[in-house]
């Protein structure tokens, strides 16, 4: 009995897929639910499992071929149904294939003498020359220098320590294997490029920046991360704080959480905050979505973020995981960038970019006085579609995000409340 392997439904709007790689060859034994091949869609790349155990009898769709949902990809059969290898191909190995001749050892080379003979000089040594005494020169005493006049002692002497040389090792920078190579453009890379180019062509995009002092937030994270990891099982990075602040500010500024439909002449203001998070993978950038992020706590956002990032890096995202984002948060500072002008995806009004949190001198005002202190500072950027969002709207939204991050409002959401 044979079992057909069809292309399953991969989401609401997904009607076709492209075979990017077969993980099994014809004749290979497969188990039920074992991955057979990889399929790429306009939403996400995913693996197609085997519907039954047996042997892969035939492959219907080759790599780089696109088929519709429901089309047959391969056929699985029982072990006895697999085509056996022709008898002519089964032959015992010949003498040349079983054992290679062992080369004879080279005869030992005699060691050279420890003390090689010194050749005799070709030129005889010169004859001895009679000694001639040098002329006698009378001694003349050097002039005695005059004693220096005493000078007035300096009023102030500052001792300057000698500078200490600081040597920093040069970090190792291994060469990439891509140097000097010409590689084919992958389907995933082409889709990313087409979407971003289309977004820039259809939208009037620009970016506004603010700087936020997140010293209190970073101290809160430092105090809570050990207890947080023990309670939730995930690490507490700064990113969930920024997602929480972004989602909370969207409730106050719905124009930033909206979609413009020029064909219908309408603007849709969303009543939920479905936030996409940019995740880099080996195959390129993908954007899984935290559904209803505005209703989640920091712990809930941290759990979902970790789960989605793990699925993205292992290729297990489903089309539903990457669909429906109304707003995007991109942590461009995760690799050290101070700020960035992020491209707004199609169907969204704005994207928040979060830079690297760095310590630097900043002015701190308290009790009516100002002082300079070492603070944790971060740049926030809002890229937005100017057809829908004005510069004042962008500045007001960033101001709200900045206020939330600089206040202690996120502390109550993070630390559990205990009642006696």
Image: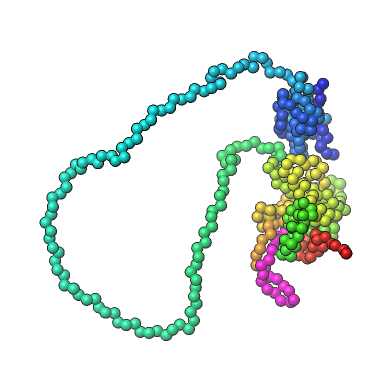
Magenta segment includes 364: yes
Note whether 55 is above or below 140 in the view shown: above
Residue drawn at the location 77% of the way across and 19% of the way down: 81
Q: Which residues are magenta?
A: 362-380
Using the image as rendered, state which of residue 55 and residue 352 is in the foreground: 55
| Residue in the foreground of this view, choosing between 28 and 143 | 28
Quarter of the picture holding the N terminus: top right
Percent x, y for residue 329?
76, 53
Residue 376 at least partly seen: yes
Residue 304's x, y, as percent?
Answer: 79, 49
- Going 18% across and 44% down the picture, which residue do you hit? 123
Left or right, 269 with reference to 240:
right
Q: Is residue 206 magenta?
A: no
- Name the quarter where the C terminus is drawn: bottom right
Closest to the observer, 97 or 25: 97
The residue lying furthest to the top in this view is: 88
**What kind of secondary structure does the magenta stretch mostly adopt?**
strand
Q: Residue drawn 66% across and 52% down?
A: 335
Give residue 219's quadrant in the image.
bottom right
Residue occupying the point 20% across, 75% down: 140
Q: Position of residue 412 (x, y in %)?
A: 82, 62
Q: Is 45 displayed left or right of 418 in the figure? A: left
Q: Can residue 204 be seen in this snapshot?
A: no
User: Residue 367 appears at what percent x and percent y?
Assistant: 74, 76
Tell me where residue 399 sits by quadrant.
bottom right
Q: Is residue 368 above or below residue 81?
A: below
């Amino acid at each position: 009995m044979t079992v057909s392997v069809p292309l399953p439904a991969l989401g609401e709007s997904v009607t076709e897929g492209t075979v990017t790689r077969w993980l099994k060859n014809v004749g290979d034994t497969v188990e039920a639910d074992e991955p057979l091949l990889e399929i790429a869609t306009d939403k996400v790349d995913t693996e197609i499992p085997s519907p039954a155990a047996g042997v892969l009898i035939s492959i219907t769709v080759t790599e780089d071929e696109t088929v519709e949902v429901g089309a047959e990809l391969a056929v699985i059969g029982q072990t006895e149904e697999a085509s056996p290898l022709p008898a002519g191909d089964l032959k015992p190995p010949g003498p040349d294939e079983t054992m290679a001749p062992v080369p004879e050892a080279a005869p030992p080379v005699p060691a050279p003498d420890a003390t090689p003979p010194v050749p005799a000089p070709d030129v005889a040594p010169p004859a001895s020359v009679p000694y001639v005494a040098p002329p006698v020169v009378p001694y003349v005493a050097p002039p005695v220098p005059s004693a220096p006049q005493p000078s007035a002692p300096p009023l102030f002497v500052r001792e300057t320590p000698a500078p200490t040389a600081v040597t920093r090792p040069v970090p190792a920078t291994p060469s990439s294997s891509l140097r000097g190579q010409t590689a084919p453009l992958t389907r995933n890379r082409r889709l990313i490029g087409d979407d971003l180019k289309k977004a820039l062509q259809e939208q009037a995009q620009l970016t506004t920046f603010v700087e936020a002092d997140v010293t209190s937030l970073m101290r809160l994270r430092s105090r809570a991360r050990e207890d947080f990891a023990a309670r939730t099982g995930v690490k507490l990075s700064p990113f969930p704080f920024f997602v929480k602040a972004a989602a909370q500010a969207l409730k106050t500024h719905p124009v930033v959480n909206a979609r413009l439909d020029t064909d219908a002449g309408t603007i849709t203001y969303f009543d939920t905050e479905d936030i996409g998070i940019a995740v880099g993978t080996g195959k390129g950038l993908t954007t899984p979505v935290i559904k209803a992020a505005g209703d989640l706590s920091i712990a809930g956002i941290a759990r979902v973020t970790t789960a989605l990032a793990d699925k993205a890096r292992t290729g297990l995202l489903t089309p539903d995981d990457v669909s429906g984002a109304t707003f995007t948060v991109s942590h461009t500072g995760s690799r050290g960038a101070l700020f960035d002008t992020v491209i707004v995806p199609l169907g969204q009004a704005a994207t928040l970019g979060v830079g690297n949190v760095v310590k630097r001198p900043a002015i701190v005002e308290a009790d009516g006085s100002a002082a300079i202190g070492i603070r944790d500072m971060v740049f926030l950027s809002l890229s937005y579609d100017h057809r829908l969002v004005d510069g004042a709207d962008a500045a007001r939204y960033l101001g709200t995000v900045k206020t939330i991050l600089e206040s202690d409002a996120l502390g109550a959401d993070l630390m559990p409340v205990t009642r006696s």
